[in-house]
Amino acid sequence: MSTIETLPVWAAVLVAVLLGGGALTTLLGTIGLIRFPTFYQRVHAPTLGTSFGAAFVLVASMLVFSLMEARPVLHELLILAFVTITTPVTLMLLARAALYRDRAEGQELPGWDDDANAGRTRSASSGSPPSAQASTRRAQASSEASS
């Protein structure tokens, strides 16, 4: 195994840029987590920061160890695949769980105006979900039309 001193200058510069880009991207995702006001906005920024930040750092790692060992080192591709797959899936599960909770509690859903939100929340009087309410209205309308 070679030492870091044998790394070519062009590779050292490229690795430094990749590591700096990965760190900056992850930092921006963290700032987005702190800056955004709602849960739905907060959950998006760290996901992108984690995915892209990890990608930059792992590419830098692949480059360093491939050049130092004079053979391709591809273990980082497996790590990158897991990070790329699991981070967005976690985002979707968290967002869906929060959306389900908000709908169950009858809270106003973020990002929708009052007209769009009115048809998507549970009715305070019936307690049934919007799809059931729409089905009931369609059944009433068709029965009135047939009689």
Image (cartoon, grey):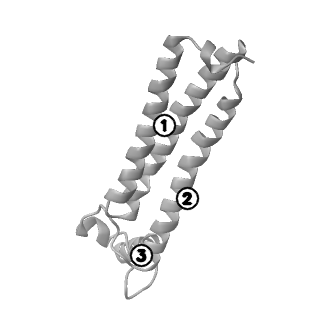
Residue contact between numbered discs 1 and 3, judged by CB atoms under 8 Å: no
* Number of residues whose C-alpha sits closer than 10 Å to that of mark 3, classed few (under 14), some (14–19) or many (20 or more): some
Give the structural element (helix, strand or loop) at label 2: helix
For badge 1, the amino acid type reads Phe
**Closer mark to the observer between disc 1 and disc 3:** 1
How far across and down, in percent of the image, does residue 143 sit? 40, 76
- Quadrant for residue 24, please give it: top left
Q: Which residue: 43% across, 80% down?
A: 105
- Of 137 and 34, nearer the camera is 34
Q: Residue furthest right?
A: 1
**Closer mark to the observer between disc 1 and disc 2:** 1
Q: Residue furthest left?
A: 114
Residue 133's disc number:
3
Q: Earlier in the sequence, mark 1 or mark 2?
A: 1
Please name the residue that numbered disc 2 is placed on. Answer: 93
**Quadrant the N terminus occupies:** top right
- Quadrant for residue 69, please give it: top right
For badge 2, the amino acid type reads Leu
- Of 84 and 17, nearer the camera is 17
Residue 52's disc number:
1
- Of 141 and 33, nearer the camera is 33
> Do we see residue 144 in this rendering?
yes
